[in-house]
Amino acid sequence: MDYGENKDNTSALEAENDDQSSEKVVDDQKVDRENLEKEKEKKLSPEEELELLKDKLARTFAEMENQRRRFEKEKDDAYEYGGYSFAKEALNLLDNLERSKVALENDEKLKNTDALKKIVEHLNIINNDMLSIFKKNNIEPIKSINEKLDPNLHQAMMEVEDDTKEPGTIVQEIQKGFMMKDRLLRPSLVGVSKKKTEESEKENQKDEKNQ
């Protein structure tokens, strides 16, 4: 082995030792910093400890207050809308009463009989009693007839040609909708007005000429 090779090996060993020494210095510095921070924590003055406790207490009370408000809101919602599902199901009773009345009125054997009049009277009494109970519990029907179609309250099921109404005006109520306070129980199923075909074609022709 010649002198140049020995020199290279020596340089490599020295470089490796320098790297190891640098890493050791960095590790030692890190340990020293961690020890210093621990010492600082241990050496908190009584005033500093008191401030630290105050901060922890404030955070704890803030969290407790947030939880209290959340529970209050959940309790209020349960009180206000606890009967929401029941009310929604109860609407089926009104629908069945209405269907029964219509079926009886369309029965050829019962038409114009005293028996039918008495039955319809009783059905109307039951219907009105149910609506009264609903109203006491803040459940009220949605206004539909002659109102403008509101997608938040009404669901258009059909269009009816009617030149006496503005297009989009509700002219037929297929199924009554209801609100429970500010919540929608179900939308009203309705028919809305549209212009007659002939009138629509004339207006389209006018628009095309103007263009």
Image (tube, helix red, strand yellow):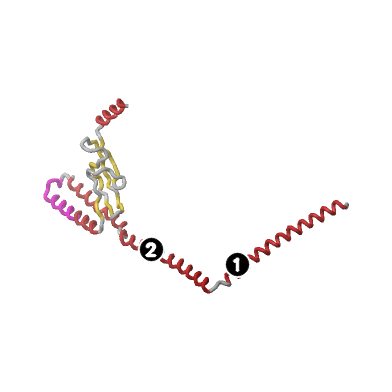
- Say if the magenta span includes residue 116: yes
Foreground mark, 2 or 1? 1
Residue 80 found in image quarter: bottom left
Q: Is residue 150 left or right of residue 13?
A: left
Q: Hey, which quadrant is residue 61 in on the image?
A: bottom left
Front-most of 39 and 96?
A: 39
Image quarter where the C terminus lies is: top left
Please name whichever residue, 85 or 167, is drawn nearer the observer in this view of the structure: 167
Q: Mark on residue 69?
A: 2
* Residue 210 rendering spot, x and y as whole percentages: 30, 26
Tell me whether the residue at label 2 lies in contact with that at label 1, contact meaning CB atoms closer than 8 angstroms. no
Per the image, the residue denoted by label 1 is 37
Q: Earlier in the sequence, mark 2 or mark 1?
A: 1
> Quick check: 119 left or right of 155?
left
Characterize the magenta stretch by its predominant secondary structure: helix
Measuring from the top left, give residue 14's x and y in whole percent: 78, 57
Q: Residue furthest bottom?
A: 46
**Amino acid type, callout 2:** Arg
* Stretch of the chain drawn in magenta: 109-126
Secondary structure beneath dot 2 equals: helix
Q: Residues within 10 Å of mark 2 (few under 14, many from 20)?
A: few
- Vertical placement of 187 versus 79: above or below? above
Q: Residue at x 67, y 63 (%)?
A: 29
Q: Residue at x 63, y 65 (%)?
A: 33
Horizontally, residue 86 falls left or right of residue 56, namely: left
Closer to us: 87 or 15: 15
At label 1, the amino acid type is: Glu
Name the residue at the right extreme. 2
